[in-house]
Image: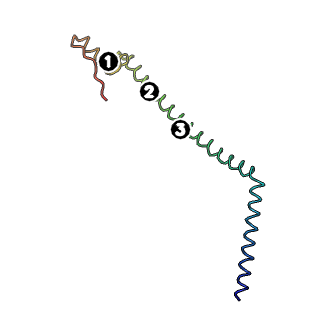
């Protein structure tokens, strides 16, 4: 019985070795096809990441433009109402009121 089990092991190992040789032969023969497929897959994910980043930046830019437009509309309304904030901004308007009132002209402090 010991000899039969040894023969079965050697024949199964020989079959596995043959399969490994076939796989290696296919890899060697098809290496450029495999490399090309990997490049295509990598390119797909790279382009997808670039498109997502571009969309994110466009959305951020649109939001910034909307904020600027809203601020400009607010300042325009202030100018149309005769409010100094539309011309000088909020801190500048306070300073101009003090100057016109004859008070001491202080420069506004910036907070950090």
> Is 10 placed above or below 74 here?
below
Q: Tell me if mark 1 has few (under 14), some (14-19) or many (20+) residues whose alpha carbon lies within 10 angstroms of its own.
A: some
SS at mark 2 in the image: helix
Q: Quadrant of the C terminus?
A: top left
| For the residues bearing labels 1 and 2, Cβ distance under 8 angstroms | no
User: Hey, which quadrant is residue 87 in on the image?
Assistant: top left
Determine which of the numbered discs, if any, sits on residue 56 in the image.
3
Task: State the image coordinates of residue 95 (x, y, percent, origin top left).
Answer: 28, 16
The residue beneath circle 2 is 70
Report the mark closest to the observer, 1 or 2.
Answer: 1
Q: CA distance from mark 1 to mark 3?
A: 35 Å
Determine which of the numbered discs, if any, sits on residue 16 in the image.
none
Taking 87 as reference, is 15 left or right? right
Whichever of labels 3 and 2 marks the residue nearer the N terminus, that label is 3
The residue beneath circle 1 is 92
Task: State the image coordinates of residue 72 (x, y, percent, origin top left).
Answer: 43, 22
Rendered residue at 52%/35% (across/down)? 59
């Amino acid at each position: 019985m010991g000899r039969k089990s040894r023969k079965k092991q050697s024949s199964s190992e020989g079959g596995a070795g043959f399969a490994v040789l076939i796989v290696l032969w296919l890899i060697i023969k098809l290496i450029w096809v495999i490399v090309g497929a990997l490049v295509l897959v990598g390119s797909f994910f790279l382009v997808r990441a670039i498109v997502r980043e571009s969309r994110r930046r466009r959305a951020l830019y649109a939001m910034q433009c909307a904020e600027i437009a809203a601020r400009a509309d607010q300042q325009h309304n202030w100018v149309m109402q005769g409010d100094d904030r539309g011309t000088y901004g909020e801190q500048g308007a306070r300073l101009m009121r003090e100057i016109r009132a004859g008070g001491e002209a202080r420069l506004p402090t910036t907070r950090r």
